[in-house]
């Protein structure tokens, strides 16, 4: 014989199924919200990393330019110091 095919047995089972479905639905919504939140955060981080890399590239270019300028000035200073020393020697010979 088949038991509990009609009546209260099915209603109780249906109620439990519906309650379980609602719990899973709530859990699914929570996971979807978390996923969207984490996705937005990830996208923001990717954009920030891209921006920082661009800034780093600009700074590296600026650093190379400044190093080049500094090396050029160091050479010019060396030349000027050599000239100043040469002129002082000539002055000493004449003085």
Image: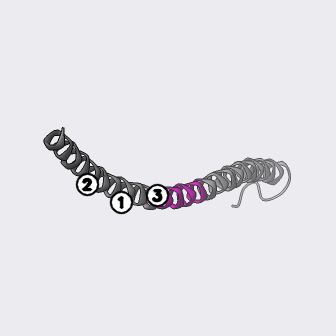
CB atoms of marks 2 and 1 within 8 Å: no
Using the numbered discs, state the Cα–Cα distance from disc 2 to disc 1 in whole angstroms.
17 Å
Q: Residue at x 36, y 59 (%)?
A: 68
Image coordinates of residue 4 in percent, x first then y, are 76, 54
Q: Is residue 24 magenta?
A: no
Image coordinates of residue 23 in percent, x first then y, are 73, 47
Q: Which residue does the numbered mark 3 point to in the structure image?
A: 62
- Dot 1 falls on a residue whose secondary structure is helix
Q: Residue at x 33, y 58 (%)?
A: 72
Write down the quadrant of residue 92 in the picture. top left
Using the numbered discs, state the Cα–Cα distance from disc 1 to disc 3 in whole angstroms.
10 Å
CB atoms of marks 1 and 3 within 8 Å: no
* Majority secondary structure of magenta residues: helix
Q: Nearer the viewer, residue 59 or 41?
A: 59
Write down the quadrant of residue 69 in the picture. bottom left
What residue span does the magenta drawing correspond to?
45-60
Mark 2 or 1, closer to the camera: 2
Q: Residues within 10 Å of mark 2 (few under 14, many from 20)?
A: few
Mark closest to the chain's N terminus, 1 or 3: 3
Image coordinates of residue 76 in percent, x first then y, are 31, 55
Horizontal side of 38 relative to 52 (left or right) equals right
Q: Residues within 10 Å of mark 3 (few under 14, many from 20)?
A: few
Horizontal side of 81 relative to 47 (left or right) equals left
Q: Residues within 10 Å of mark 1 (few under 14, many from 20)?
A: few
Q: Nearer the viewer, residue 53 or 83?
A: 83
Mark 2 or 3, closer to the camera: 2
Task: Quarter of the image for the N terminus: give it.
Answer: bottom right
Q: Is residue 56 magenta?
A: yes
Mark closest to the chain's N terminus, 2 or 3: 3
Q: Which residue does the numbered mark 1 point to in the structure image?
A: 68
Residue 23 is labelled as none
Residue 79 is labelled as 2
């Amino acid at each position: 014989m088949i038991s509990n095919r009609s009546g209260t047995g099915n209603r109780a089972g249906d109620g439990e199924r519906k309650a379980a479905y609602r719990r899973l639905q709530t859990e699914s919504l929570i996971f979807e919200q978390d996923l969207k939140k984490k996705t937005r955060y990830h996208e923001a981080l990717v954009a920030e990393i891209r921006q920082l890399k661009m800034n780093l590239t600009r700074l590296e270019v600026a650093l190379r330019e400044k190093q080049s300028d500094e090396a050029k000035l160091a050479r010019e200073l060396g030349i000027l110091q050599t000239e100043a020393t040469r002129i002082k020697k000539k002055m000493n010979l004449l003085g």
